[in-house]
Image: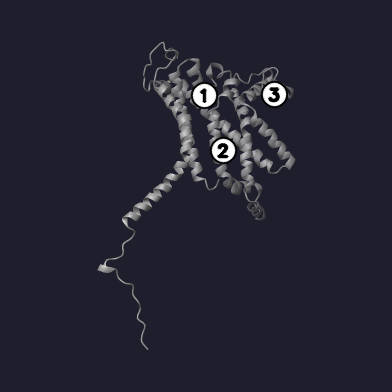
Amino acid sequence: MTALTPVLPEAPQGGTPAKGPTTAARKSQRFANGKRGLEPWLYLAPAFIVLIALLGYPIFQLINVSLYDYRQAQVSGKAPLNFVGLENYQKLFADPQFWTVLGNTVVFATACVVFTLLVGSSLAVLATRLRPWVRSMLFVVSLGAWATPAVTGSAVWLFLFEPTLGLVNKSLVAIGLTQFEGYSWTYDKWSAFGLVASEVVWCSFPFVLVTVYAGIQAIPTEVIEAARIDGASMPRIARSIMLPMLRPIVIVVTIQSIIWNFKIFSQIYIMTNGGGIAGQNLVLNVYGYQQAFAASLYGLGSALGVIMTALLMVITLVYLRILKRTGEAL
């Protein structure tokens, strides 16, 4: 009986090792990969074209006008355009009122965001514990506030807080707070800001309510039930289980609220009669309107618009970065 001899693979002729894909094959593979990489951009191309048409040209014109001394005389053609470069930006940064208005905007927007999140989130948690018909009524009333136009809501809010005929002052006097008889809520700077902020929160919290409630409903009930069986209290469940699972939604809602409240115009302009006494309640949008249209300093107003656009773009980039990081959780 003879032993079996293992069959060895034939060595390539010439004793050289076998080569990988040919150069042509590698080029073809790279071309295919590049084609697949361009495919998403081809689908996005129509949206990019529309955005460039609707936003690119106006932003370009805004930047262009901000570099000129552009007033009513230049608009009517009675005077030539005078290129001043960054002089309008230098005037803004050297103006103490600009920094005061910027501080007002930051404080006002922060307060609106905080109270909007608190009210909306609290009502969202409350909605999970209400009977279906009560919860439906809560959503109907809240969405009615959300659907109310800003101008209409501001007028109604002013009527409620009117010094002599307003329901709020009459109610406060009726319970013994006589110091509110004839009290003007728009005279003092911070009471006026508080009045406007309350209206902004009133018309903004329904978005937070609906969004957070949807997030709570998406949490698996098995997780909460298991925590209850283990003896966890409801505050502990909310802090250790629900809040971490709702974090992506809360982050998105917070950043969107910051963008919206940073651009407030109608409520401030209507409720404080254009910015309050001596401009004490000015925010950036109203300040820019005054510079561009009331004072006919279109170049200076455009520079302020560029600054606001840059600030909002930074906030938007942060928003998109957070969305990218938390996309799987959303």
Which residue is denoted by mark 3 in the rendering? 168
Q: Pick the residue in front: 28 or 143.
A: 28
Q: Which amino acid is tagged 1?
A: Asn
Q: Which amino acid is tagged 2?
A: Val
* Percent coordinates x, y for residue 253 in the rendering: 56, 38
The answer to the question of whether label 1 and label 3 lie on touching residues, with beta carbons closer than 8 A, is no
**Mark 3–mark 2 distance (CA, rounded to whole Å):** 31 Å
Instruction: Please tell me in which quadrant of the rendered image residue 5 appears.
Output: bottom left
Secondary structure type for disc 3: helix
Q: Pick the residue in front: 282 or 185.
A: 282
Which residue is denoted by mark 2 in the rendering? 253
Question: How dense is the environment of label 1, judged by Cα within 10 Å: few (below 14), some, or many (20 and up)?
Answer: many
Q: Earlier in the sequence, mark 1 or mark 3?
A: 3
Secondary structure type for disc 2: helix
Q: Earlier in the sequence, mark 2 or mark 1?
A: 2
Q: Pick the residue in front: 269 or 7.
A: 7
Q: Nearer the viewer, mark 3 or mark 2?
A: 2
Q: Is residue 315 above or below residue 195?
A: below
Instruction: Please tell me in which quadrant of the rendered image residue 65 appears.
Output: top left
